[in-house]
Image: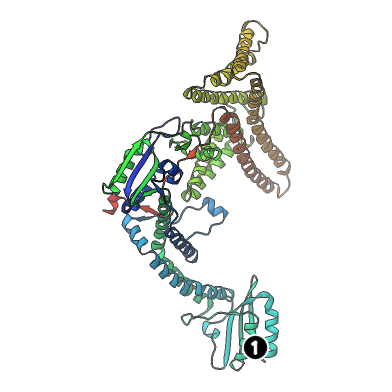
């Protein structure tokens, strides 16, 4: 956990931070806060009515537009100099990040920001002079690379006129015919490159005027070969690539650092719009995690050299205005993307992430209980973690989730004795859904009751905190009584009105009574909803069985064709590999979807309302750089 953050059942406690500062210290203060991701700023314009005109809201400045335009220019340089990796689908998933973050200091970033426009102007001039100029030349040379021709043969002489360039494909026939008719003598070579045709025209110098008129008529874009190019097309291509690569290498570090610095500068400028102003004094208001409140105060006082006033106070307004920051729990943090995909918990609401993580992992393991499937998912998670996980935090979280569910599938595969549908016989340590469907169904129902009951207890906790006694009686306690009484009757099989059966019926009727007291007659509808919720967990058995028998069907087909002369073994191997990958693909998607449905619908509905405001701090998004530590810098 970061900075002594304490685990809590609800989101991290917040405090309100209010600060007054002189205008000359706004930038240093925001920069210090931005680097530490510590404050969620409140827009002062939303509070303007409370100040009765004393505080003036700050509107968007022309400076924001200037830096936005500069960022667009930098982004174009990224494309021109090929700083971004162009990755296919498989590379996006499995290829590790090649470029390590550049270590940078505050001073270096500040210097580059001061020189930003001059630097971008300089690089753009070089790009226009080399990269853009050479692009069409390079494409032309690539199209003629198989010809035995040298660069000096593509230049005009005293008696021979040589024109090279490109024209639209539909103009080629007319261009060729008119050159033959009007120019007397002309040789034309055209390469096929999509809708563009690269053309070499050779004719007599005496026909230059007529040839030029024809080329302009048919839209030829002329290409002029630089004098520096020599040798055959391959040598010329290497020379151009070297020029572009040298240009990229020379400017790469500064442009990458500048990109991150400009992004951060824009974030600070946009955050200024959330401040207020009284003359030269700026006001700032925001939410800070309680365990980092003193750190935020110190950052502001240090950045302002003491010329700022900071006030910290506990939550003093409706909790709907307070942002929710979920606690970083070791082993569970990767599941936050699944929790927040549904909704953000309110500030005073239970954080469902750890409960989702445990139940989701168990559900997926039960539905895809097969060692072979689990090993494949585990391997996929490791490859994604090593690849896309190095470039994206969300992909890193997804990879870690795949690792957990892969281990869960392996664990339940050992218990049920499943390895690719029995292809490798293993002892059944617990039970097999394929051979014992009724017993597996009962386990699924019990798992469902335990899952729903845990949601009921969480709902009871919520209502205890908010002192909603009627809801505790009518929703939570009544549900627990119904489960307890129904469980006694179901598991003992004593349905008569005597002995254990009478105890079970008494508890059930007590639950019905509490339900009517708490919710009235409409509460009886909860009984059908409760039954349908419990039955929903039968999908744990159904999907497990579907996967198990699907694998067995493929194995049966393999047994039928393996005896085919010559090709039988090869066909069977291909079939089983295809079957395994198909089962992994289908199983992963179906178990993901159904597990999330059980969590979101059957579990969340017992305690979770959502509608929270996500904690969104002023932060510096570093894509290509990392801040050099004081120790390294010194």
Q: Which quadrant of the view contains residue 259?
A: bottom left
Q: Nearer the viewer, residue 129 or 148?
A: 129
Query: Horizontal placement of 420 versus 398: left or right?
Result: right
Q: Which quadrant of the view contains residue 601?
A: top right
Give the tally of numbered discs: 1
Q: Nearer the viewer, residue 338 or 592?
A: 338
Question: Which residue is painted at 53% across and 33% down in the image?
Answer: 356
Q: Which quadrant of the view contains residue 166?
A: bottom right
Question: Does residue 611 lie above or below 632 as drawn?
Answer: above
Q: Position of residue 79 (x, y in %)?
A: 50, 64
Q: Position of residue 232 (x, y in %)?
A: 52, 79
Question: Which residue is painted at 50% across and 35% down in the image?
Answer: 345
Element at label 1: strand
Q: Is residue 242 visible?
A: no
Q: Is residue 388 visible?
A: yes
Question: Which residue is painted at 68% across and 37% down in the image?
Answer: 550
Question: Does residue 162 lie above or below 242 as drawn?
Answer: below
Q: Residues within 10 Å of mark 1 (few under 14, many from 20)?
A: some
Query: Horizontal placement of 18 versus 320: left or right?
Result: left
Question: Does residue 358 lie above or below 392 as drawn?
Answer: above
Q: Position of residue 130 (x, y in %)?
A: 47, 74
Q: Position of residue 323 (x, y in %)?
A: 45, 38
Q: What is the residue that sits farthest to the front in this orientation?
A: 52
Q: How is the image coloured?
A: rainbow
To which residue does mark 1 refer?
186
Question: Which residue is painted at 53% across and 77% down in the image?
Answer: 233
Question: Does residue 590 lie above or below 206 as drawn?
Answer: above
The quarter of the image holding the N terminus is top left
């Amino acid at each position: 956990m970061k900075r002594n953050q304490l685990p809590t059942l609800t989101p991290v406690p917040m405090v309100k931070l209010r600060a007054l500062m002189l205008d000359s210290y706004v930038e240093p203060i925001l920069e210090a806060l931005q680097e530490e991701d510590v404050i969620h700023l409140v827009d002062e314009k939303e509070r303007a009515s409370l100040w009765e005109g004393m505080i003036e809201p700050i509107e968007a400045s022309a400076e924001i537009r200037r830096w936005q335009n500069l960022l667009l220019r930098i982004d174009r340089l990224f494309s021109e100099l090929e700083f971004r990796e162009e990755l296919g689908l498989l590379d996006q998933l499995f290829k590790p990040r090649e470029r390590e973050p550049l270590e940078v200091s505050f001073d270096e970033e500040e210097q580059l920001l001061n020189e930003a426009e001059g630097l971008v102007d300089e690089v753009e001039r070089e790009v226009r002079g080399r990269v853009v100029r050479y692009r069409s030349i390079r494409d032309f040379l690539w199209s003629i690379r198989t010809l035995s021709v040298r660069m000096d043969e593509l230049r005009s002489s005293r008696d021979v006129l040589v024109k090279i360039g490109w024209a639209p494909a539909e103009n080629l026939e007319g261009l060729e015919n008119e050159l033959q008719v009007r120019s007397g003598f002309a040789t034309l070579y055209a390469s096929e490159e999509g809708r563009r045709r690269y053309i070499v025209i050779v004719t007599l110098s005496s026909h230059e005027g007529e040839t030029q008129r024809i080329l302009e008529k048919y839209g030829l874009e002329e290409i002029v070969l630089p004098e520096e190019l020599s040798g055959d097309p391959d040598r010329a291509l290497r020379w151009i690539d070297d020029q572009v690569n040298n240009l990229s290498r020379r400017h790469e570090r500064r442009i990458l650092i500048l990109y991150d610095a400009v992004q951060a500068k824009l974030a600070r400028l946009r955050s200024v719009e959330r401040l207020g102003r009284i003359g030269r004094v700026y006001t700032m208001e925001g939410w800070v995690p309680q365990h980092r409140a003193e750190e935020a105060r110190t950052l502001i006082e240090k950045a302002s050299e003491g010329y700022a006033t900071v006030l910290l106070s506990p939550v003093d307004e409706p909790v709907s205005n307070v942002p929710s920051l979920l606690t970083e729990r070791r082993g569970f943090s990767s599941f936050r993307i699944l929790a927040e995909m549904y909704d953000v918990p309110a500030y005073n609401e239970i954080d469902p992430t750890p409960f989702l993580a445990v139940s989701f992992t168990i559900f997926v393991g039960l539905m895809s209980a097969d060692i072979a499937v689990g090993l494949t998912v585990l391997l996929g998670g490791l490859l994604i973690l090593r690849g896309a996980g190095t470039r994206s935090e969300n992909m890193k979280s997804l990879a870690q989730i795949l690792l957990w569910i892969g281990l869960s599938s392996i664990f339940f595969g050992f218990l049920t004795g499943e390895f690719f549908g029995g292809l490798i016989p293993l002892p059944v340590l617990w039970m097999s859904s394929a051979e014992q469907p009724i017993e597996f169904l009962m386990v699924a129902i019990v798992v469902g009751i335990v899952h729903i009951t845990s949601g009921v207890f969480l709902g009871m906790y919520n209502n205890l905190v908010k002192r909603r006694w009627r809801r505790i009686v009518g929703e939570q306690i009544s549900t627990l009584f119904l489960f307890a009484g129904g469980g006694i009757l179901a598991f003992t099989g004593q349905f008569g009105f005597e002995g254990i059966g009478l105890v079970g019926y008494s508890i059930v009727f007590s639950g019905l009574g509490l339900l009517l007291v708490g919710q009235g007659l409409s509460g009886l509808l909860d009984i059908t909803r409760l039954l349908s919720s419990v039955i929903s967990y039968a999908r744990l058995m159904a999907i497990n069985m579907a996967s198990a028998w699907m694998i067995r069907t493929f194995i049966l087909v393999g047994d039928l064709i393996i005896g085919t002369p010559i090709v039988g073994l090869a066909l069977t191997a291909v079939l089983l590999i295809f079957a395994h990958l198909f089962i992994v693909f289908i199983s992963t998607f179906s178990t993901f979807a159904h597990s999330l449905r059980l969590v979101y619908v059957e579990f969340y509905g017992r305690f979770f309302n959502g509608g929270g405001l996500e904690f969104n701090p002023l932060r510096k998004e570093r894509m290509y750089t990392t801040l050099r530590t004081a120790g390294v810098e010194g």
